[in-house]
Image (cartoon, helix red, strand yellow):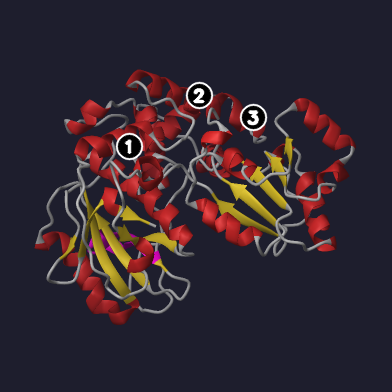
């Protein structure tokens, strides 16, 4: 992280952290490396233990109870490097439930699990790369005019606002990513940083997560195939075949399953689960996840495609069946990241909807805790036609009042509500 603490820009997750720490003793801030967990946690810290420092780690292993001596808030950074720290914190919370005592940050789930889950003592909070609001918001360039939280009320709020953001801006966001420490001064510098990020996952992070890799090339090919499958529900066999094109003997699921498992433990994979409604009976729904990386910029780096090539409609990487262009799927990936950050602020979840046979499909279902939902489609276009909203209107007819609102996110200039009640929202104008 290169960000100066004095120049800290507030993140959306800060509000959630503040509310939780006002009531609870310990929070675990989880997410992939480089999203800003440490910087965010340090804004509240009185005492810090950085466990990626060998000297700090050695001293702590000799005397673990040092973690519990601070009177203020203690940050335990990269706690997974010393898994017993989790149990030390859990026991400290059992003994003293004062709020705001600990933040544990982790870039991976440890290979050696704690002896106790910490349920009820240590609450997990997910931190993802920066959303468009966090990257772009300023009084001059962009102010969001539509709130996801207002859509979740079911009050059908007025939709309005205009933006100068266009396709080139969204492509720039897709290719540069939402990692706050990444250089953005030049495209070449950004590409080099993202390629270095991917290389570190393969060369270092897997080993740190307790998984040795005998064939780094096979892992990178598998990650590249997964990137090509972004925003699809491609099967394991399809991704495996794409990763091993031209090889007669395909590897077994058992031999490649560790790739998927470890990448999820590193928070690098962030698949969107299928929506399985509990309040409504919708027959023949698929249950497979939609594939997403933590940030679409990682997919761009793995596929080796440039911003200009994406705008030109080109593709890259192993062949992958997809409905539409690669750019359209990466735009959906960008929206998956944004919607998850915004939904988390409202204690809502994000999933996708698909009927068997692909007869009905909706990109995102944002569900409140009571399972009432907002349905959202994405479209890489400035305009919306009646054909584009047909699945949203069908779902409204199926579940009635349980559909709180429906929207299409576009790359257009204006936000408005159509005569049929469906909101049209430029991606730049949607906020938490």
Q: Is residue 330 above or below residue 285?
A: above
Label 2–label 1 contact, CB within 8 A: no
Determine whether the residue tagged by mark 1 lies in a helix, strand or loop.
helix
Closer-to-camera residue (358/336): 336
Determine whether the residue tagged by mark 3 lies in a helix, strand or loop.
helix
Is 430 magenta? The answer is: no
Determine whether the residue tagged by mark 2 lies in a helix, strand or loop.
helix
Q: Can you identify the residue that label 3 sits on?
A: 207
Closer-to-camera residue (154/292): 154
Q: Earlier in the sequence, mark 1 or mark 3?
A: 1
Residue 101: which disc?
Answer: none
Judge from the rendering whether residue 1 lies leftward or rightward of residue 164; answer left or right. Answer: right
Q: Can you identify the residue that label 2 sits on?
A: 199
**Res 42 seen here:** yes
Residue located at (38% from left, 40% from top): 135
Q: Quadrant of residue 110?
A: top right
Q: Earlier in the sequence, mark 2 or mark 1?
A: 1
**Res 231 seen here:** no
Residue located at (11% from left, 61% from top): 387
Judge from the rendering whether residue 122 lies leftward or rightward of residue 12; answer left or right. Answer: right
Magenta-highlighted residues: 353-366
Q: Give x and y (percent) for residue 423.
A: 21, 64
Residue neighbourhood size for the residue with mark 2, other residues' Cα within 10 Å, grouped as few (<14), some (14–19), many (≥20): some
Alpha carbon separation for disc pair 2 and 1: 19 Å
Q: Can you identify the residue that label 1 sits on?
A: 174
Judge from the rendering whether residue 171 lies leftward or rightward of residue 274; answer left or right. Answer: left
Q: Quadrant of residue 53?
A: top right
Q: Give x and y (percent) for residue 6.
A: 56, 35
Is 365 magenta? The answer is: yes
The quadrant of the rendering that contains the C terminus is bottom left
């Amino acid at each position: 992280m290169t960000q100066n603490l004095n120049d800290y820009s507030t993140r959306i997750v800060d509000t959630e952290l503040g509310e939780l720490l006002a009531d609870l003793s310990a929070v675990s801030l989880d997410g992939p490396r480089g999203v800003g967990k440490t910087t965010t946690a340090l804004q509240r810290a009185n005492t810090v233990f950085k466990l990626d420092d060998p000297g700090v780690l050695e001293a702590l292993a000799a005397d673990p109870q040092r973690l519990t001596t601070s009177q203020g808030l203690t940050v335990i950074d990269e706690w997974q490097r010393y898994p017993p720290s989790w149990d030390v914190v859990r026991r400290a919370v059992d003994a003293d439930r004062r709020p705001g005592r600990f933040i544990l940050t982790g870039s991976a789930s440890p290979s050696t699990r704690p002896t106790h889950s910490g349920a009820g003592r240590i609450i997990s909070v997910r931190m993802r790369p920066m959303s468009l609001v966090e990257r772009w918001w300023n009084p001059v360039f962009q102010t969001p005019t539509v709130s996801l939280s207002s859509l979740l009320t079911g009050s059908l709020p007025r939709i309005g606002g205009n933006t100068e953001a266009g396709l080139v801006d969204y492509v720039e966001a897709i290719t540069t990513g939402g990692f706050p420490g990444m250089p953005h001064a030049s495209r070449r510098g950004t590409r080099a940083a993202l390629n270095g990020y991917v290389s570190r996952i393969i060369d270092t992070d897997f080993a740190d997560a307790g998984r040795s890799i005998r064939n780094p090339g096979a892992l990178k090919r598998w990650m590249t195939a997964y990137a090509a499958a972004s925003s699809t529900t491609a099967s394991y066999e399809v991704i495996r075949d794409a990763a091993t094109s031209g090889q007669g003997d395909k590897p077994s699921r058992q031999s490649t399953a560790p790739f998927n498992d470890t990448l999820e433990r590193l928070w690098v994979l962030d698949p969107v689960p299928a929506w399985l409604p509990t309040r409504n009976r919708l027959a023949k729904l698929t249950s497979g996840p939609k594939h997403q990386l933590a940030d679409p910029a990682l997919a761009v780096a793995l596929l080796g495609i440039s911003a200009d090539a994406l705008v030109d409609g080109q593709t890259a990487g192993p062949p992958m069946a997809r409905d539409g262009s690669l750019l359209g799927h990466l735009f959906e990936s960008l929206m998956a990241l944004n919607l998850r950050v915004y939904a988390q602020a409202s204690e809502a979840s994000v999933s996708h909807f698909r009927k068997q046979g692909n007869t009905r499909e909706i990109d995102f279902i944002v569900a409140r805790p009571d399972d009432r939902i907002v349905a959202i489609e994405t479209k890489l276009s400035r305009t919306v036609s009646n054909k584009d909203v047909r699945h949203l209107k069908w779902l409204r007819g199926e579940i009635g009042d349980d559909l709180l609102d429906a929207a299409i996110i576009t790359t257009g200039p204006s936000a408005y509500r159509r005569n049929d009640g469906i909101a049209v929202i430029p991606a730049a104008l949607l906020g938490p």
